[in-house]
Amino acid sequence: MKITLIISFLIITFFSISQIEKKNIQSFFGIQIKPILPAKYIGKKNYIFSTNNSDSIQYSSSINQKTGYSFGGTVRAGITKLIAIETGINFYQRNFNLNVDVPDSNISVQNDISFINYDIPINALFYIPLSTNIYMNASLGAALTMKPTRVGVSTKAMGSNEFHHTGIVNNKFGIALNGNMGFEYRIKKIGIFYLGVSAQIPIDPIFNLQTLYKHEGYRSYLYGDVNGSYFAVDLKYFLPIINNKGKQFLEGPMK
């Protein structure tokens, strides 16, 4: 149902744009890259899962979000001189640190895991001109996300102790809320340079972390959802609009 709503929103948006008079309204294509920073203010940065059964070995597993990155292509479709729709497609890699502690056995292990996904954002973008070349802008919207596969990593400790972490993807497609704000500098013959900050909040967890502890035939599982909200520093570059001299199309018999 969520995917159907997003697709319907995309179709309505682009049909609406196509009906608007485009004279003197510009659209741009660009590229973007952004470091992804842990977001403790809009989501959890650290997750701790522990056993609560007194008959089993007591241990805890934690996952800590680290710096990741994203890059992709972006398109701005102008609606008016101060309003645009921004979309594109982006690749994301989120990085996490894993820790397991077994206090009774004095065991503590660490490992790392990375999770990738893609998204197609649709944001309403608003410009605020500060000078001839400098603009402030802000946008708000949603993104259709795609998580292609689960991820996993295994760690061995002293003796026969083994720990297996698996990021389980329950739904390959999801929805996230987007927001960003920044400043851009426009040079007519060179392009647009943008610097800003953004945030994304997935509506559903990006994956469910499963921790398996194995020791001489003993098995114990821990489960917990990881949200994956983040802040990011946005760096974008948009190609300049090049107007060819002369007529763009030759006139034929039909005018």
Image (tube, helix red, strand yellow):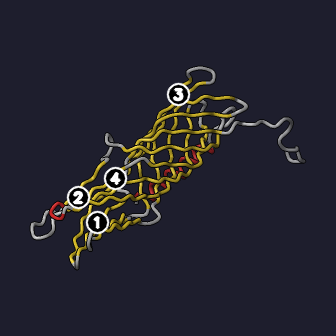
Q: CA distance from mark 4 to mark 2?
A: 14 Å
Dot 4 surroundings within 10 Å: few (below 14), some, or many (20 or more)?
some
- Tag nearer the camera, 4 or 2: 2
Q: Which residue is mark 1?
A: 211
Q: Is residue 4 above or below residue 163?
A: above
What amino acid is at disc 2?
A: Phe
Q: Residue furthest left?
A: 54
- SS label for mark 1: strand
The answer to which of marks 3 and 2 sits earlier in the sequence is 2
- Tag nearer the camera, 3 or 1: 1
The answer to which of marks 2 and 1 sits earlier in the sequence is 2
- Circles 4 and 2, Cβ within 8 Å, touching? The answer is no
Q: Residue 143 location, x and y as percent?
A: 46, 50
Q: CA distance from mark 4 to mark 1?
A: 17 Å
Query: Could you tell whether 61 is left or right of 253 in the image?
Result: left
Q: Residue furthest right?
A: 253
Q: Which residue is mark 2?
A: 49
Q: Residue 78 location, x and y as percent?
A: 61, 38
The answer to which of marks 4 and 2 sits earlier in the sequence is 2
Q: Which residue is mark 4?
A: 227
